[in-house]
């Protein structure tokens, strides 16, 4: 009787051990099945880290009824203009604007900060020739302001804003990067004996001012900001500001009676 109980105890123990082994194996099998993709990844259709994702070609997109786009179409150009009439630009997109070979610098077409050509020798020589011609009729012309760097214009414009306010300064002084003086082709001209009229509209009423308007084009210059054209040029009448274009072009602009913007068909 005692032996029978011992055998039964052994049998129960074997059953428990067997059941435990079976449960353990079941757990392993279930775990392997659940994590098979992680443990045994498939290489079918796999792209390496260095391989960019496939992009449908234009003909494939058209077959799917899609229209191919370009970065330009996705980001159309938006021109913003502030209250002073200036086109808002960021330094990295600024490039000098040439129209028919003529460099344009105004409120809509700025120059890069590092655009630094210095005074044009050709423009200076033309001014000296013009000054000699004026002297023959008793007028002593002086180019009292020529090339201005971006940094110098920054100081000048800031001083005007501090003195007269931004709205007023924007009518007669260009912001840095927007000044025609930075081209090296512009001169502020006055009469040597009449410094009191430099930078004034009254200079245009003097014999020297009138002579310049009538004769500057013969030497390659135009009155850059004529009276009554502020809505076109962006600046008030400046009887003293002359821009060098070369004799041929200056003569054509003078004959047209237009501003440089109007003559070239630009803003």
Image (tube, rainbow, N blue to C red):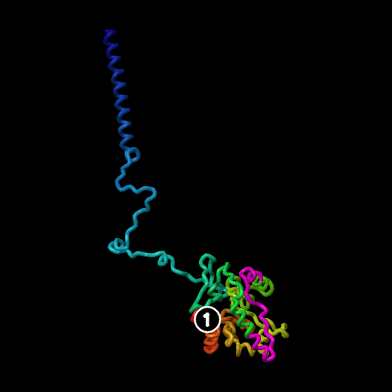
Q: Is residue 132 above or below residue 89?
A: below
Q: Secondary structure at mark 1?
A: helix
Res 210 quadrant in image: bottom right
| Quadrant of the rendering where the N terminus is positioned | top left
Q: Does the magenta portion include 178?
A: no
Res 196 quadrant in image: bottom right
**Depth order, front residue of 130/144:** 130
Percent position of residue 178, x then y: 58, 73
Q: Which residues are magenta?
A: 130-155
The residue labelled by disc 1 is 261
Percent position of residue 65, x then y: 29, 64
Percent position of residue 57, x then y: 32, 60
Q: Is residue 114 above or below residue 11?
A: below
Q: Does the magenta portion include 151?
A: yes
**Depth order, front residue of 122/227:** 122
Residue depicted at x 34% and y 57%: 55
Q: How many marks?
A: 1
Q: Is residue 227 left or right of residue 20?
A: right
Res 59 quadrant in image: bottom left
The crowd level at tag 1 (other Cα within 10 Å; few <14, some 14-19, many 20+) is: some
Percent position of residue 105, x then y: 55, 75
Residue depicted at x 39% and y 65%: 70
Q: Is residue 58 left or right of residue 259?
A: left
Residue depicted at x 30% and y 32%: 29
């Amino acid at each position: 009787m005692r032996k029978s109980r011992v055998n039964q105890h052994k049998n129960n123990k074997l059953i428990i051990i067997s059941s435990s082994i079976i449960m353990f194996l079941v757990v392993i099998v279930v775990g392997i099945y659940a994590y098979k993709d992680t443990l045994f990844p498939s290489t079918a259709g796999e792209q390496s880290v260095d391989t960019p994702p496939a992009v449908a070609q234009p003909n494939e997109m058209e077959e799917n009824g899609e229209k191919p786009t370009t970065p330009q179409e996705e980001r159309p150009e938006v021109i913003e203009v502030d209250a002073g009439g200036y086109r808002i630009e960021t330094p990295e997109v600024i490039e000098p604007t040439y129209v028919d070979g003529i460099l344009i610098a105004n409120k809509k077409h700025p120059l890069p900060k590092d655009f630094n050509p210095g005074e044009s020798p050709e423009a200076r020589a033309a001014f000296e020739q013009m000054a000699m011609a004026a002297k023959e009729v008793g007028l002593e012309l002086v180019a009292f302001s020529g090339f201005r760097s971006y940094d110098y214009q920054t100081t000048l414009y800031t001083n005007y804003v501090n003195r007269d306010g931004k709205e007023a300064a924007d009518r007669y002084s260009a912001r840095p990067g927007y000044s025609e003086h930075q081209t090296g082709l512009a001169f502020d001209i006055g009469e040597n004996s009449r410094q009191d009229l430099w930078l004034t509209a009254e200079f245009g009423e003097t014999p020297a001012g009138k002579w310049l308007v009538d004769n500057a084009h013969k030497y390659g210059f135009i009155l850059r900001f004529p009276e009554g054209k502020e809505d076109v040029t962006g600046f008030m009448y400046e009887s003293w500001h002359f821009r060098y274009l070369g004799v041929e072009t200056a003569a054509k602009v003078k004959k047209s009676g237009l501003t440089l913007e109007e003559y070239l068909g630009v803003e």
